[in-house]
Amino acid sequence: MKIKIAYCMPSLYWAGGMERVISFKANYLAEQLGYEVYIIITDGKGQKPFYELSPKISIINLNIDYDQLHGKPFHEKLTLYIYKQRLFKKRLSGCLKKIKPDITISTLRREINFINSIKDGSIKVGEIHVNRNNYRGFQHERIPGYAKRILQKLWMNQFISKIKQLGCFVVLTYEDKAKWKEIEESKMEVIHNPLPFYPSEVSTGNNKKVIAVGRYTYQKGFDLLIQAWDIVQKEHEDWKLDIYGEGDRSSLQRQVESLNLQGSCFLHPPCARIDQKYTESSIFAFSSRYEGFGMVLVEAMACGVPPVSFACPTGPRDIITDGIDGLLVENGNIQMLADKITYLIENEELRKQMGGNARVNVRRFSKEVIMTKWDDLFNKLLNDREMNP
């Protein structure tokens, strides 16, 4: 009998890391493991998923449209949010009771506030795509700092109480797992994100290109990378930096122009075949201020591209063996990031050796290894429920 599974997430049209990972996992479960897969979303009605999905997957859009909240003053946003939450709960409850999944996976967004109360018979699993310290922030709200701290604490306390009610809580790294001390060990699992591809064509390490990939947001730290590139470029004018990502890049473009880097630093839109761009490059630069895992690190390494990465929370320490398959840099240290990029530029043989090591070492994140862990977890949860109804 097929296992029936439902993912709950905001949307599918963004070229984001979570969207990419969920799309990949859903495809694998449906195509390779024979699961009956549903993806339930709240936003993006009429918009095509950015990542290709198997025709065996059912997409259900509840049309809540949380995007309406963007740009509104905090008091208006709060009133509209409460209304939409009530609507979301009603529609999601009806949806789950209709399709009757064996397991419902929350990506721990707005549905986590009520998903445990929906009595549809499914086991509720939560998977988090960011680290604890950077979950549910109010950085962009125009409210006083003390109020932000109070709200942050209240939200985290509420969040933990909801996690405790789940059948299982899945985190992306062992580094992050250690931070969730309130959650029972037996209810937690560490499952890394799966490597979506392992190409036969790999980087030669000869092209004078550095690549970075991610959304154009504060989190990804491209402003820091551009500052570091300003240092690198002064010594190596023949090397280029290519950044690919979703979002508004106008402020970063102004930074590039203010530093007169237009001839060596290029900001691109997202690329669906990003593996081809990795293989055209010789170094991967990772400048995130924080992460959940850092999927692009694994992808670049699979293409034989050695990374130079901030040791940000969380992910890089789980992925990179410093000095063997990449280089770790003190988080936020721009000069050190520039120095390490320069070091790999100037040491061609080491660069190629690290790229080869990287390609071998990331096999532990292969889709077969990671998706077997998910399959084992789902079967264990269902077997435990059968044994202890």
Image (cartoon, rainbow, N blue to C red):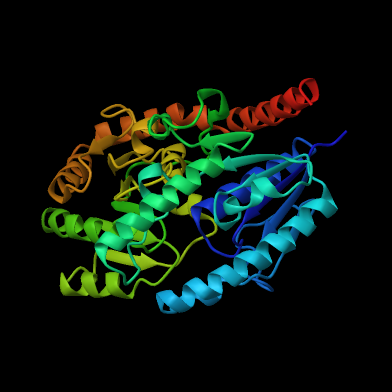
Q: Kindly identify the residue that appears in the image at 26 percent across and 35 percent down.
A: 327
| Residue 108 located left or right of residue 133 | right
In terms of depth relative to the viewer, which is nearer, 236 or 193?
Answer: 193
In the picture as drawn, the residue positioned furthest to the right comes out as 1
The percent coordinates of residue 180 (x first, y second) are 42, 34
Image quarter of residue 163: top right
The percent coordinates of residue 368 (x first, y second) are 63, 30
| Residue 163 located left or right of residue 386 | left
Task: Please give the count of numbered marks on the rendered protein.
Answer: 0
In this view, 96 is above or below 188: below
The percent coordinates of residue 162 (x first, y second) are 55, 44
In terms of depth relative to the viewer, which is nearer, 314 or 196?
Answer: 314
In the picture as drawn, the residue positioned furthest to the top comes out as 387
The percent coordinates of residue 114 (x first, y second) are 63, 52
In this view, 332 is above or below 48: above
In terms of depth relative to the viewer, which is nearer, 282 or 151?
Answer: 151
**Residue 241 can be seen in this image:** no
Q: Kindly identify the residue that appears in the image at 48 percent across and 74 percent down.
A: 77
Which image quarter holds the N terminus? top right
Image quarter of residue 329: top left
In terms of depth relative to the viewer, which is nearer, 138 or 246?
Answer: 138
**Residue 272 can be seen in this image:** yes
| Residue 295 located left or right of residue 257 | right
In this view, 363 is above or below 289: above
Which image quarter holds the C terminus? top right
Image quarter of residue 223: bottom left
Q: Kindly identify the residue that appears in the image at 78 percent across and 39 percent down.
A: 102
| Residue 240 located left or right of residue 189 | left
